Structure formats: C-alpha cells, structure tokens
Image (cartoon, grey):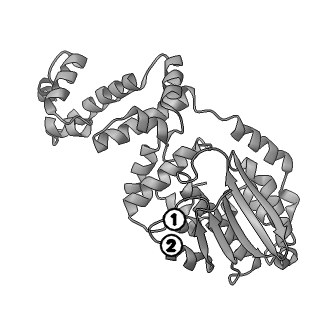
Amino acid sequence: MLPQIFDQREGPLAVAYQRAGLDRSLNDGIITRAQALAVFNYSARLLGVDAFSLTCASAADPGRLGLLGLAMTSGLTLRQCIQNLSRALPAFEAGATTVLSVRGDEAFLRHHLAGGDPNAAGFLYEGVAAFLVQSIRGLMGPGWSPTLVQFPHRPPSKVRPFEEFFCAPVVFGAPNGAAICFPAAELDKRVSSFQSGNGLRWESVQIAAQEINSFELRGERLIDSCEKIIDGMMMSGKVSLPAAARTLGLSVRSMQRRLSALETSFEDLTERRRRQRAVELLADSNLRIADVALALGYSDTAHFIRAFRRWYGKPPAAFFSRG
C-alpha cells in the first residue's frame, strides 16, 4: 500500500514512480518489495523530508487497506485485533509475518520481513511499525504509546523524530526484525472502534495471499517496468542494468535470463526507448539537438548523432529540419 501522500502522482512524485518501473495509476495492484522501497527512497530524496517513513505512516488510512484494514478493526479486544492482523498479513505482503508474544508483564508485537538485507528494508520496517502504532492508537485512544520500539537496521541520522512519534525509547540494530513493546495487561482491553467482522471473509484473504505468493515479474509486465525505469534513468544521465535489476528486486543474471526468454535484452530495450524518445523530442522545435542528447542520457552529443544516423540513416538535424 502506498498511502495518501502518494495520491498526488504528478510533478516530482511522478518521477519516483517512473524510476521504480511503476505506472502512476498503480493498476497492477501487486508490486515487488524492491519497487515499493524505490518509490519511498526516491520520494524522500525529492521531497527532502526527514523521517519520511513516519510521514507516510501518518498519512496512511486503515479504511483503504481492504482486507487488512478490516481485519485490524474486527476484534473486540486489542488481542483479537492483533491476531486478526497477523492472520491477514500474508494477503498484504509476501514474506512478512507479525507475531504477538507475551513474556511476563510485557507484550511484544514483532514484524519480520523474510529474506534480504534489513538495512535495505529499513524504510518498510519503520513505516509498518509507525502504521501499527497509529492503528493501535485508533483502537485504544490517541494517548496510547508503547514502552519500547526496536528496529533491526542501522539508525538514521536523526533518531529524535522517531522517539517523538512513538513517545517511547527507540532502539536500532536489534535482532529478529522490528518489535513494539507494551504492557500485556492492555491486550484484553476492549477497543473503542470495533466494527463487525461479518464482512471479513477469510477465504478472500487466503486467495489474495496465494496471488501474492505466486506473483512474478515476467512477460510484458517486466518489459513495461524496464522501459519505465529506462525512461527515468535517461533523465538522470546514466542507464544501468545493475541499478534497474536492483530496483525490480532481481539479480542481474536473473533479469537477463527473463528478458532473453522474451527475445530481448536490457540493451535492446534501452536502444528502442532512445529511438522512440528521440523522435518525440525532436518534434519539439524548442529543443536543441544537444538538449535531446542530454535527455536521452548521452554525455556527448556526437554519440547521439552517430546513434541516430544508425537508426534512421540520417543525422537528427535532417530530421529536425523537415519538422
């Protein structure tokens, strides 16, 4: 889920979607974890916001989370709500688990993402923990706060915004995922915003979980994502296969194999997009040939002119002069 702050997909944030290989409408529904992280990370840099994960969590709306949002508000007590959340989570994110445990007087709500580097997934750990705390405050009252919050990744440059948000000590570099700690006595307190769980069909949750687990970035979906990423990379001046593969959560070799099975390659896609974009940009009489070369990721105008002559049998100036 990309929260409300990303509903404005024009302007700077549109670039973040493109760099992640996503359509602005997000009609596909399912995206890779790496793509979600790419959107968040690019957007944080574009907007220049500290602790951007907290901003996103604050903007997120449980009412728009479908099965997961319904599960979170379908219990009479906090314990039941958390248990429903844990059961529904596989339909929301593959490889993610949320487990509730009690040790003595303390309860621990742990969130773990299977596979990958926790430092790379730090944004998701922060955002999920912040969203969970926001949701529990909606159930228990705005004054609710944990006693401790732990994260598995390296600390950000500024820790204070996290402590102010959670109203609790925050520890980074802890093992075994993120954890939200709070008094166990609160588990059996009645929540203040109970909704009937009659509309929560667990069969739908299981079907959604199966769809997520079987999702693979292949075929036309892969080509479309690569082309969007290439377009974004051309604007930055450097088109890179390793960077594109990383954005899609694939190894370079795996991405090469998948594209080869489609009888193409990342290099072929890059050249095809440059050819298409060259014609589109040259149709704009306000752009110089040097501007077009730069927009296509060429550091040298001469390289672009040679490529254009190879594609169309004439230099871009001849194409441009014919209008």
The residue lying toward the viewer, choosing from 284 and 146, is: 146
Residue matched to label 2: 159
- The answer to whether residue 226 is seen in the rendering is yes
- Given contact means CB atoms under 8 Å apart, are the residues at marks 2 and 1 in contact? yes
312 above or below 80?
above
Q: Is residue 192 left or right of residue 40?
A: right
249 above or below 198?
above
Point 88% across, 59% down: residue: 198
**Image quarter in which the N terminus is found:** bottom right
**Picture quadrant where residue 95 is located:** top right
The amino acid pointed to by label 1 is Pro
The amino acid pointed to by label 2 is Val
Point 47% across, 58% down: residue: 8
Point 56% across, 67% down: residue: 59
Q: Is residue 114 left or right of residue 225?
A: right
Residue matched to label 1: 155
Q: Is residue 97 left or right of residue 312?
A: right
Secondary structure beneath disc 2? loop
**Image quarter in which the C terminus is found:** top left
The residue lying toward the viewer, choosing from 291 and 93, is: 93
**Picture quadrant where residue 196 is located:** bottom right
